[in-house]
Structures are given as C-alpha cells and as structure tokens.
Image (tube, rainbow, N blue to C red):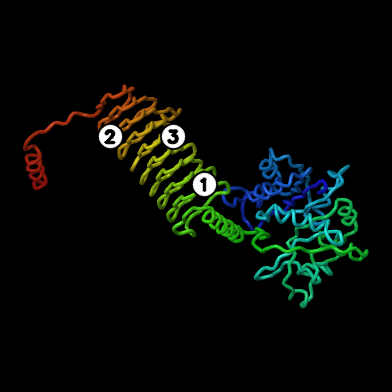
Amino acid sequence: MRPLATIILAAGQGTRMKSGMHKVLHPVAGRPMLLHLLASVETLKPQKKILVVGAGRDQVEAAVSGHDVQIVVQDRQLGTGHAVQQAEATFNGFVGDVLILYGDVPLVRAETMRMMLERLHGDGTPVAVVLGFRPDDPGAYGRIVANAHGAIEKMVEYKDASEPERAITLCNSGLMAIRQEDLFTLLARIENDNAAGEYYLPDIVMLALHDGRQSAVVETESWEVSGVNSRIELAKVEAEWQRRRRIEAMRDGATLIAPQTVFFSHDTVIGKDVVIEPNVVFGPGVIVEDNVTIHAFSHLAGAHVKSRAEIGPYTRLRPGADIGQGAKVGNFVEMKKAVLGAGAKVNHLSYIGDANVGPGANIGAGTITCNYDGYFKYRTEIGAGAFIGSNSALVAPVNIGDGAIVAAGSVITHDIGSDDLALARGRQEAKPGWAAKFRTVMNAKKKAK
C-alpha cells in the first residue's frame, strides 16, 4: 500500500437538522457521527487526515481535538469538488493515495475503504474508484453507468440526468479513492455548468474518461453509505447501527430476550452467557463480563459489571459504578462512583453514591448514602459482611466496619467499629388509649363548627 491521506468533507450547514449543533456532531450510539468515521479511518493509519469545515467550524474543530486532524476551511459552499480543492495546499510534498469521505456518512467500514484502495491498484489501474450502492429507493442520488466489469462509462447527478439514466439503480455514494497526483490536476479542470451551478467532484471521472483513462466502481450495501441530512435520517442510521450491534452481541454469546428493545452504545462490551431482558439501555463506557443477568428497564452508563452479577429490574448504574462478582443490584436502585464488593447486595429502593461496599455486605431497602452537603462530595466506607438496616441514612464521610450492623431507620453520622451495632433513631413511646381520646375530642370540635 502506498502512503494514504484522507479528506473528510464536513463544511455543509446542515440546515435540515434544524439544530444549533453541527450536523456531523449529532450522535449515533452515543458518539458523534464524525468520530465514528474517524475511528474507522484511523485503523488504516493514514499519514494525513484532512477535515474540510465551513459553517460551525469551531464546534467541529473542538470535537476532533486530539485526533491529529488538519483543518481546512471552505468559506463558500460551491460543491464537493470545490470543497476538496481547499485541501490542496496541505498536500505539498505528499505522494500517495487519497480517500475522500463525508462526515455525515458515518458507518463506512475500514474494510470497505481498503477494498476501494485495493481496486485502485488492481486490474487496469483505474484513475479513480467510486463507491456505489443500490438503495431500495434511488431517489435523488447521482447515477453511475458501468459495464459488466465495473468500468465507469458515465456518472451524472440526478438533477442533470435523463429519464433513462434516472432509471438506473446503481448510485454514487460520493466516496472516492484516487491517486494524489491525479486528484488536483483533474479538479483544476472541472466547471460548474450544471443545474446547481456547483463544482461536482464526480466530474473528474468524466474528465479522465475524456482523456482515455477509465475509472471503476465497487459496490457496498446501502446501509453502509447512508447519509444524514435530517433527524429522520439520523434515526434511520441509529436504528441500523443498533440492529447490527444486537446481531453481533447474540452471535458472540449473549441472549437478548427482546432484541429490538435493547440499545447499545458505540463502546459497549458484552461477555458470553449474558442475559439481557427487555428495555435495557447502555450508555457509553459499559463493560459487562460473562454470566451476568440484566433485568428489564435498567440503564447503565460508565459502569463495570463483573461475572455472575445480577442487575435490575429498574436499576440505574451511573459512571463509576463497579459491581463485583456475584453481587446483586435490585429494583429502583441507583449507584454512582461506588464499588459493590463480591456477593454484596443492594436489593431495592436505595441510592449508593461515592461509596465502597465490602464483599458480602447487605444494604437494606431505602438506604441512602448522603454524599453531598450542597458544596462538596464525601465518601462512605462499608466493610465486608456489614448489614445496613432498611431506611437508614449514612451521612458521609463515615466508615462502617466489617460485620457491623446498622439498625433500621438509623441516621449514621459517626464511624462504627467492626462487629458493632449502631442505633440512631428516636425512642418509641406508647400511650394507651390516647388515639381514641384524640378522635373523640376532635369530632366534638368538628360538630361544634
């Protein structure tokens, strides 16, 4: 393989998104579309990664910080060919291949990019390789006329196509592989005498053909080159990404009871023999080890769930939740920045935040760690085998020793030693017959009115 450069076009205004956020930054599976594409690009180890920006450039530049991307600006949107031309100055001294991609086409796989580059150096050494696809509804896509060997005979934008050309099902995704030494020479020759008055990138294929040099088309599935120009199209891309990820999870050994109701993030890690019940959502940063059960209506983000643990139903694990082997987090429990030791249980109706819970500890229903005083956060330490009675409030910072017991309904504000019992609640007092006398007096007052 020759040295590689990538040019990603992201200068469009994205007005159909009706958003203050740049179009390419809208997320799919919890990650901006542009970063999905960059992740695939980076597996090819290109020498140059160039991003063409325009409106909303500050947002885009901030999003790619740390990705070693060169930014160039297209001040006026005069078409895709004009956009690529803006990158020419960055190629001084570079000789190699160029992949042209789109920031709002996020699902293109690295394997497909490699296929394009391999074809560029395959039979006939085409000038350019265009990625084609056959959608169910070709709509307004540009069309590709090619022979049986994939050699391109004509490329035409929909606005400029004849009726017979519009009947062709092979469409142009816009993605292209080309040698650097051909790209900018051909771009300098394109004109804008078309229905939109724009400089079209595909015109370089026809210019090369006029010179007697042919280009080739390779095909991929339509889902992979689905572009996003509206919220509706964003939802379709999200749905396709989720569909494929669910299949991958099941092929890798997870059971999804109702697959269509489970939503993964771009970096979700799921082990073998994991059972995921309906209506479970994974935010970014979740690792689930083998033999875990996640019951219905649970939401996990930034959490690590170790083997044989049981989560839910109706559990929320927030960033920093670390659930030990065989531990149980039950219904209506929320955990954040908290470690739950092996075999420990928080079965219901509790909030455990900024805490360490030792192995084998049992947290009773309605228990909360009071970790915030309105200004600062504090930690709660609960020892191995400790038992926290129901409806207890643990006011951090506080340490509860191994094997200690906290009586139900206690408000704990001081440390508790190992194997100690702590009671911190009002004393119960009984007054025989008081309730009946109270009712008699109050009913008499009510009648007097």
Q: CA distance from mark 2 to mark 1?
A: 32 Å
Q: Is residue 364 left or right of residue 43?
A: left
Residues tagged 1 and 3 counted as in contact (Cβ below 8 A): no
Q: Quadrant of residue 228?
A: bottom right
Q: Is residue 447 left or right of residue 399?
A: left
Report the residue marked by disc 2: 389
The percent coordinates of residue 272 (x first, y second) are 49, 49
Q: Quadrant of residue 202?
A: bottom right
The vertical placement of 76 against 62, above or below, is below
The percent coordinates of residue 118 (x first, y second) are 79, 55
The percent coordinates of residue 208 (x first, y second) are 89, 62
Q: CA distance from mark 1 to mark 3?
A: 17 Å
Mark 2 surroundings within 10 Å by alpha-carbon count, few (fewer than 14), some (14 through 19), many (20 or more): many
Report the residue marked by disc 3: 338
The percent coordinates of residue 100 (x first, y second) are 77, 53
Residue at (74% x, 74% y) in the render = 168
The vertical placement of 195 against 119, above or below, is below
Q: What amino acid does circle 1 point to?
A: Gly
Report the residue marked by disc 1: 283
Residue at (87% x, 56% y) in the render = 187
Q: Secondary structure at mark 3?
A: strand
The vertical placement of 166 against 300, above or below, is below
Q: What amino acid does circle 3 point to?
A: Ala
N-terminal label among 1 and 3: 1
